Amino acid sequence: MKINKKFAVIISLSAMALAGVAAAKPGFKDEPEQYKNLKVLPKNISSKDLNGIMVDDFQDGLGVTCNFCHASAKDGHGLDFVSDAKPEKEISRVMMRMTIALNKKYLKVKHPLIGSNALVVTCNTCHKGEAFPEGSEPK
């Protein structure tokens, strides 16, 4: 029985040591994902913050889903988030810049960032859950 306990302790300590070494390697860190083609949002944005903006600001604020701005992938599976093929993506960038500018210039928000609770004017201010605010529907 003593041999089995010693063996179990040795195995446990070895496993803990290996886990510590694995966690110390760069490939195992929680490094932020590097997104491509971000022109308004910070290049080092976390996936949590990016997903929050996409859900809270765009899905909820405009009542749209991802394919409203993002083009389909060329292989037909999913979306190509890097592509600028759809004009709606550039329009959303213009709107984000406008929102930042309004908050900074007129409402004196010191460091306005899309997705921040400090913003006074947001997508929802005008859109109110609709893709096209009242009076701005495309013809």
Image: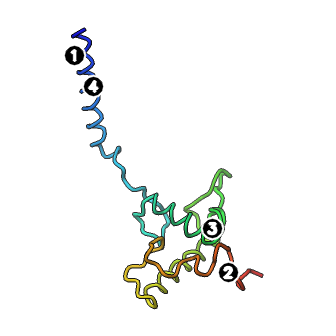
Residue 52 drawn above or below residue 120: above
Question: Which residue has dot 1 on it?
Answer: 6
Q: Is residue 30 above or below residue 38?
A: above
Q: Secondary structure at mark 3?
A: loop
Residue 40 placement (x, y as % from top left): 47, 73
Q: CA distance from mark 2 to mark 3?
A: 16 Å
Question: At label 4, which amino acid type do we have?
Answer: Ser
Q: Earlier in the sequence, mark 3 or mark 1?
A: 1
Q: CA distance from mark 1 to mark 4?
A: 10 Å
Q: Tell which circle, 2 or 4, labels the residue nearer the N-terminal end.
A: 4
Above/below status of 109 relative to 84: below
Q: Is 105 positioned to the left or the right of 14 in the image?
A: right
Q: Nearer the viewer, mark 3 or mark 4?
A: 4
Q: Which residue is mark 4?
A: 12
Residue type at tag 2 = Pro
Q: Amino acid at mark 1?
A: Lys
Residue behind mark 3: 69
Above or below residue 10? Residue 107 is below
Callout 3 amino acid: Cys
Specify which label sits upstream in the sequence, 2 or 3.
3
Query: Mark 1 and 4 residues: CB-CB less than 8 Å, in contact?
Result: no
Q: CA distance from mark 2 to mark 1?
A: 71 Å
Numbered badge on residue 133: 2
Q: Residue at x 52, y 83 (%)?
A: 98
The residue mark sitting in front, 2 or 3, is 2
Q: Residues within 10 Å of mark 1 (few under 14, many from 20)?
A: few
